[in-house]
Amino acid sequence: MSAEQMKAEKDKAAARVLEKLRKQEEAAREQFASEERRKQKEQTKRLDGLMMSLDVIKLMEDFNRRRERREMKDNY
């Protein structure tokens, strides 16, 4: 095998390794992005739940305030 053939074989092998690494990096980036999207979705869902809870608390406070006013009016 001549020196040129050996260099060509090494270059081919290096190109295969580089391509494999590029694919692994791409897969890792996609997995990271997917995980970030999942985390963002989970946080959004949690925030929506907290906002709904806050709305319920506000409604209950309104209801209680109105009830107290009605009771005060009834007592006078």
Image (cartoon, rainbow, N blue to C red):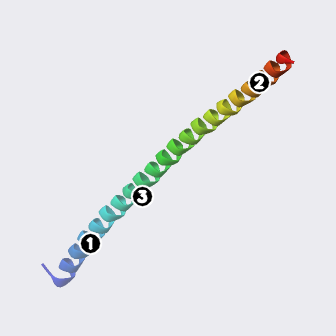
Q: Are marks 1 and 3 in contact (CB under 8 Å)?
A: no
**C-alpha distance separating marks 3 and 2:** 58 Å
Residue 66 lies left or right of residue 2; in this view the side is right
Check disc 2: other Cα within 10 Å, few if <14, some if 14-19, many if 20+: few
Using a 10 Å C-alpha cutoff, classify the residue at mark 3 as few (fewer than 14 neighbours), some (14 to 19) or many (20 or more).
few
**Mark nearer the N terminus (3 vs 2):** 3
Please state the horizontal and vertical placement of residue 59, each as a whole percent of the image: 71, 29
Q: Which residue is situated farthest in the top direction here?
A: 74
- At 64% from the left and 36% from the top, the residue drawn is 54
To which residue does mark 2 refer?
68
Callout 3 amino acid: Arg
For label 3, the SS is helix
The quarter holding residue 9 reads bottom left
Q: Position of residue 11 (x, y in %)?
A: 26, 75
Residue pointed to by mark 1:
14
Mark 1 → mark 3, Cα distance in angstroms: 22 Å
Q: Mark 2 is on which residue type?
A: Glu
Location of residue 28 by image quarter: bottom left
Instruction: Calculate the distance from the C-alpha at mark 1 to the C-alpha at mark 2.
Output: 80 Å
The residue where tag 3 is placed is: 29
Residue toward you, 28 or 67:
67
Furthest toward the left, the residue is 1
Q: Secondary structure at mark 1?
A: helix
